[in-house]
Amino acid sequence: MDSPTVIFEDYQVEAPAEAGETILEVANRAGVGIATYCGGQGTCQQCQVVVTSGTVQPKDEAHWQQWPTATGEGIKVLACQSVISEDITVKVPIGSRAEDFIIHEMEPLKPKLVDLSRFEPLSPLAQQFVLDLPKPTLEDTLTDMERLRRELLNDEAELEPLTIDLPVLRELPQALRENDFQVAIAVTDTGLARKIAAIRPPTAAQRSIGLAIDVGTSTVAVELVDLDNGQVVGRAIRRNGQIAYGEDVISRIVWTQKGPEQLQNMHQAIIDTLNEIFRYLYDEHNAAPDEVIAASVAGNATMINFLLRIDASPIRRTPHTPPATEMPVVTAEQLGLNIHPQAAVCVCHPAVSGFVGGDITAGVVATGMHEAEELALLVDVGTNGEIVAGNKDWLMCASCSAGPAFEGVGVEAAMPATAGAVTNFHYSRDRDAVDYETIAGQRPRGIAGSGLVEMIASLVEAEVIDRTGNMNADFPSDRLRRSDGELGFTLFEADETAIGEPIVIYQHDIENLLRSKAAVLAAINVLLGKLDLAATDVEHVYLAGAFGAGLNVDRAVAIGLLPDVPRERIEVVGDSALAGAYLTLMSRQAREQAQETVSAMTYLDLSSDTDFMDEFIASNFIPHTDLSRFPSVDM
Amino acid sequence: MDSPTVIFEDYQVEAPAEAGETILEVANRAGVGIATYCGGQGTCQQCQVVVTSGTVQPKDEAHWQQWPTATGEGIKVLACQSVISEDITVKVPIGSRAEDFIIHEMEPLKPKLVDLSRFEPLSPLAQQFVLDLPKPTLEDTLTDMERLRRELLNDEAELEPLTIDLPVLRELPQALRENDFQVAIAVTDTGLARKIAAIRPPTAAQRSIGLAIDVGTSTVAVELVDLDNGQVVGRAIRRNGQIAYGEDVISRIVWTQKGPEQLQNMHQAIIDTLNEIFRYLYDEHNAAPDEVIAASVAGNATMINFLLRIDASPIRRTPHTPPATEMPVVTAEQLGLNIHPQAAVCVCHPAVSGFVGGDITAGVVATGMHEAEELALLVDVGTNGEIVAGNKDWLMCASCSAGPAFEGVGVEAAMPATAGAVTNFHYSRDRDAVDYETIAGQRPRGIAGSGLVEMIASLVEAEVIDRTGNMNADFPSDRLRRSDGELGFTLFEADETAIGEPIVIYQHDIENLLRSKAAVLAAINVLLGKLDLAATDVEHVYLAGAFGAGLNVDRAVAIGLLPDVPRERIEVVGDSALAGAYLTLMSRQAREQAQETVSAMTYLDLSSDTDFMDEFIASNFIPHTDLSRFPSVDM
């Protein structure tokens, strides 16, 4: 019998399968990049593919799963668990393509958000001291530890109690004597006490590097920072590998509730994601893991729980409170992060509640709204929408389930703001043509959050969709096609894209996006309403989250994602969570502010709020059913 | 060929050996208890035996060692590494007999030393709180951690910052929910912050137990304590298994300097010793490892370094300073101790220097000399001699290398104060007979420290030895025999002892004992001399260490171990290090005093002191070359 053949149709690849091989194995051999985290164990669920012709055999009944596809065409299976016994044709959906998990350099953060001059003198989470200690003599009999303490106290007068953990103390005597008492000492400063975290020969410690980390539900961003001066050496972003286990926090929590093994997998997925980004940054910037002596992490409560392998299921149950909001400082070794084993990994930004996490409180510290006279609003649109209103005297926050539509999940045409993502979009009805820009100037692979906002505005303007989000079935363009009974508008034809297939926005995608924007707008309005404030009282609107710097704020108001305030008051701040992580990495004062900000913040629970439900329904319209609230919008 | 036979002559056992068997294997089968820690790996060196006839083959050249014997009879080898190929006869020396490592119950400590009324209200190192927490609701949305904190603050107003380590936080959400928010919480109090160390169902936590531990160079003593009231549930003592690697701290340090594996073995030996004692106490007192939620440890600097697996070699080099005097608090899990994994193991008594360790500072706290008006002297005679002089205004200390003679090491007839040890001894010249008492009333197995003091005094009185320690070769008794040219005086004939062989004191043993007592007396006199004080200025002499409560203080002065002060001022305090560990286990105030005491203490280095050398030589006499210093001694 001839060996069966696998056709990967999106890649125009045809490859023979050997006896007993899985789709994943054939794909790997044929250079078709299918994403996998578990290395083909059947646990990570990353490698979902669609078999459109022929059938496959289960490799292992225990891990065997199959699902129908949305379009009804073919059957969805795990590539690693599907053994080939006959000729088959396979489609690799966008979410399963390895290139979606490529690490990208990212744009610098807004200078205003990461302005260290607010926090001088700097006092990073870890600091390196190169010491030339006097050797012990009969006249100078201090212990190794006291000898270090004396020298560090000379160096810096206001040192807190200086402690050392056993693993480092075990290294101390030999490290001192092998290096003739000339050593580089890393001291971490994480709260109650300073701690000696690393002892090295001075030659091995040319740099002291820290990491600022934003663990987002959809994407993970990391900055490699020179701790001596705060300079960002490199930055990179990548999809969160946990996406294999669910697109939003709730579905991930549900998955981990199956058992401790699932929680462990979820934990490992973020550790693997981080280590992969670290490796990329080390390669790009010629750094070594041992040079990294501290990490400051921001993230929502669920992400932080998973990072630390803590059961997050209480967040899913009423009253949606996480096990803890303030987290113990841990060592890299405890988590398996590929940096100096004794480096402090500090969740410097506590959460307020299960749904207003440290990513948001980090944003408050980064925008400085907690120190300003003027009333400001921080709006973070991610998988959830979180809103903070306030100034130096008070802070109030709320959250809503926005759905990850603007983050590139749940809308087939959407993708995170990484290379190939469309950030600017305009559809011209006259020319039946699209003008656009993509990240890194590549051919389109999908639409980023900012592009989605412009797309909605543009399609409303062109009357492809009406103000309720319904597609106009009579719209005179070939782009409008019906697929399995559903209307879709082709944004890019297959030959224009980098993925070899068209990028289409469907009716249900528009509905998803509308629900997302409606939830955010409703949350803003209810929060302001409780405070007897109008949107126009707000002096600054900081828009954080999935939207890149390129977001057209006029369009964001036009579709009713943001309230109608003078446009110059709206500022797209980008990844303010990462900015907060950066500030707390570099400054003790920022770390203290992060704590104080959380203590000062009041949480408004919208989940049982009837006003919110009313506002949400009224906001499921472009821009809003009450157009008098959007006087400036004329679209 | 017939299988060869092994004769264990001390045990009157004859056993056949199978092909390739080692002496240890045959002994185990024949019920001859040879001590071993490494289980026959050739690493612990515990199973040394003397082959007096026939020869053996090396099992493994890498571990093969052989030594000549002191008497020249036979050859000393490791039982586990000696393969039998022909008939042999084997002697098992006392130090290699498993029964020497038996765990014994010990006498209670002196009530005065462990009087908790000095430290009320009690605040143990760990405390258990049984909580019935209100469940989270929409009105009461505190996190699990804040919920605990609120309840514990209600319970006790002055709680310090309450922290939690990651492993315990990981257990928290499930532990609360599985037990309907009714839980027993163990909180440890170890300095900067209180820490949640354990969370259990209330039913599983009937007792909260702590351990007071004295890690001595020769013996290890442990008390099992009810943390709720300080009641001692049980106590036990056992030889320190590290004896296999050397009898005193210096020889053990030398051994660990061979490499990290040796340091690991040394560390493991004390962990194994402790776990063995714990197991005994659990069995005797129906306790479970998980009930033990804290351990307070006292020990000399070397023992503490080995306990924590820290390189102790700096203690051996000038200026003999340990890597650290104050040690980080660790968890039982970090060391592998068989108690609750998150239980705090706290070296509550810091060392002053390499040779004045936490065992001594523990003794200071236990005697209360640091709080008294009157001048006191603490004398600890162990492997080293350590002396502290002072009162509430000042404290000064010194150490000398006394040698472990009084601890039962290096003097063949000597043994630690465990079952079968002779504690009281009197030789009657008229009757040529010995009157004696032993621990547990058993037949003599060896002479304990107190017995050695009485023996020397008695032999001087009877003129078996003169005041320089020389045996009188003309002494008219059969007990005086010459063996290999050396005089020895038989204290017990073979048929009187539990070991089936005579207990003999040799000329060189007397010299060892004299050097030990001379070092102690010289250290006392030099220390007092530096302070311009006479022995008679001292109001209290606390004698700690190897001597049991039964020591005849008059005899201790008579041989010149202690200076000639009124006898009622001398108090034998026994294991004051264990008493200190007990106090710090039960009281935060004691823990604070332990720290302060060390800060207040001045260390006098005798190693380079010429006065000390002069005094040492003058003290190598019974009681002293200058008899005017011992006016009350008339022997």
Image (cartoon, coloured by chain):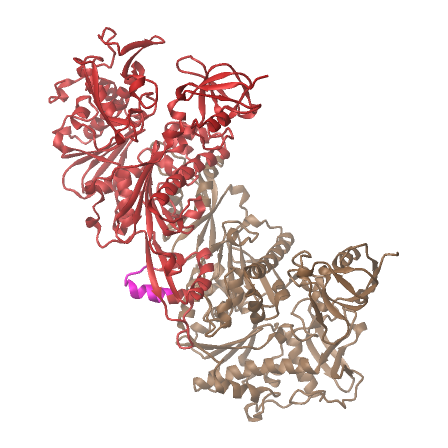
Chain colours: A brown, B red
Q: Which residue lies furthest to the right in this view?
A: A1
The spot of residue B318 in percent (x, y) is 38, 30
Question: What residue do we see at 17% from left, 26% from top?
Answer: B563
Residue in the foreground of this view, choosing between A299 and B438? B438
Residue A438 falls inside the magenta stretch: no
Q: Position of residue A420 (x, y in %)?
A: 71, 68
Residue sitting at the far top = B474
Q: How many labels does the image show?
A: 0
Question: Can residue B39 be seen from the camera position used here?
Answer: yes
Look at the picture and state if A118 lies above or below B193.
Answer: below
Task: Read off the magenta span.
Answer: B148-160
Q: Is residue B403 in sight in this rendering?
A: no
Image-based side of A432 in relation to B241, left or right:
right
Q: Where is residue A293 in the image (x, y as percent from the top left)?
A: 51, 51
Q: Quadrant of residue A233?
A: bottom right
Q: In which quarter of the image is the C terminus of chain A?
A: bottom right
Between residue A5 and residue A28, name the one nearer to us. Answer: A5
| Spot occupied by residue B414 in the image (x, y as percentages of width and height) | 31, 23
Task: Say which quarter of the image contains residue B169.
Answer: bottom left
Q: Quadrant of residue B182?
A: bottom left
Q: In which quarter of the image is the N terminus of chain A?
A: bottom right
